[in-house]
Each structure stands twice: as C-alpha cells, then as structure tokens.
Image (cartoon, rainbow, N blue to C red):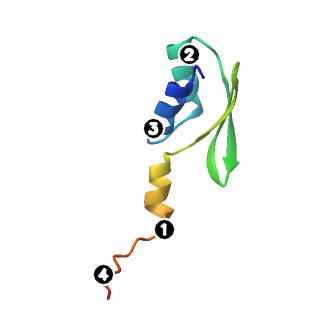
Amino acid sequence: MEYACTLMKLSKTPKLTAACIEGVFKKRHGVSVTVCNATIEKPGFKVVSDQGIFFLLERPLSYYNKHWGACHINTAAHA
C-alpha cells in the first residue's frame, strides 16, 4: 500500500487535526483526501483517498493505553 508509511507516521502524532492530515497527504503524495470526523469508541478521522478508506485516531494508541489501559500490579511486591 502506497500510503502505509504516511498513515503510520500520522498515527503516532500527539494530536491530529483534519487540516494536518490533508496537508501531509498533499505534501508527501500530491493527492487530495477527504477527511471527516468519526468516532469508533474513541474520536478520530475517516480518511477517504484514491486507495481506500482509512481510520486514524485523534491521539496515538500509547496515549489511550497510558490513560485508560489496564493497571499492571507487581504481584511479587504484594505477596
């Protein structure tokens, strides 16, 4: 897929906006994409390009894991 590197880079951006996504695609690939707000459990963006439809979260997965992820407890320390 031609846009894989761009999508991976965007997915690690601290906070995405529609204008940012459109600008990156225009700069790197010279194509216009349609970006709409979308929510699938978490806020994000639906990106429609000539190669398909993609969903990007507004924030990286690491942000959600850090703030709402499972709490890891060291069982040896609590034994």
Q: Secondary structure at mark 3?
A: loop
Q: Which residue is mark 4?
A: 76
| Residue at mark 3 to residue at mark 1: CA–CA distance | 22 Å
| Residue at mark 2 to residue at mark 3: CA–CA distance | 17 Å
- Mark 4 and 2 residues: CB-CB less than 8 Å, in contact? no
Q: Which residue is mark 1?
A: 70
Q: Position of residue 32 (x, y in %)?
A: 64, 16
Residue drawn at point x = 45 percent, y = 39 percent: 12
User: Around disc 2, counting alpha carbons within 10 Å, would you say few (fewer than 14), some (14 to 19), or many (20 or more)?
Assistant: few
Of the numbered discs 4 and 1, the one sitting upstream in the chain is 1
Q: Secondary structure at mark 2?
A: helix
Q: Which mark is residue 13?
A: 3
Q: Secondary structure at mark 4?
A: loop
User: Around disc 1, counting alpha carbons within 10 Å, would you say few (fewer than 14), some (14 to 19), or many (20 or more)?
Assistant: few
Q: Which residue is mark 2?
A: 26
Of badges 4 and 1, nearer the viewer stands: 4
Q: Position of residue 70 (x, y in %)?
A: 48, 68
Residue drawn at point x = 28 percent, y = 82 percent: 77
| Residue at mark 4 to residue at mark 1: CA–CA distance | 18 Å
- Mark 3 and 4 residues: CB-CB less than 8 Å, in contact? no
* Amino acid type, mark 2: Lys
Of the numbered discs 2 and 3, the one sitting upstream in the chain is 3
Above or below: residue 59 compared with residue 41: above
User: Around disc 3, counting alpha carbons within 10 Å, would you say few (fewer than 14), some (14 to 19), or many (20 or more)?
Assistant: some
- Mark 2 and 3 residues: CB-CB less than 8 Å, in contact? no
Of the numbered discs 2 and 1, the one sitting upstream in the chain is 2
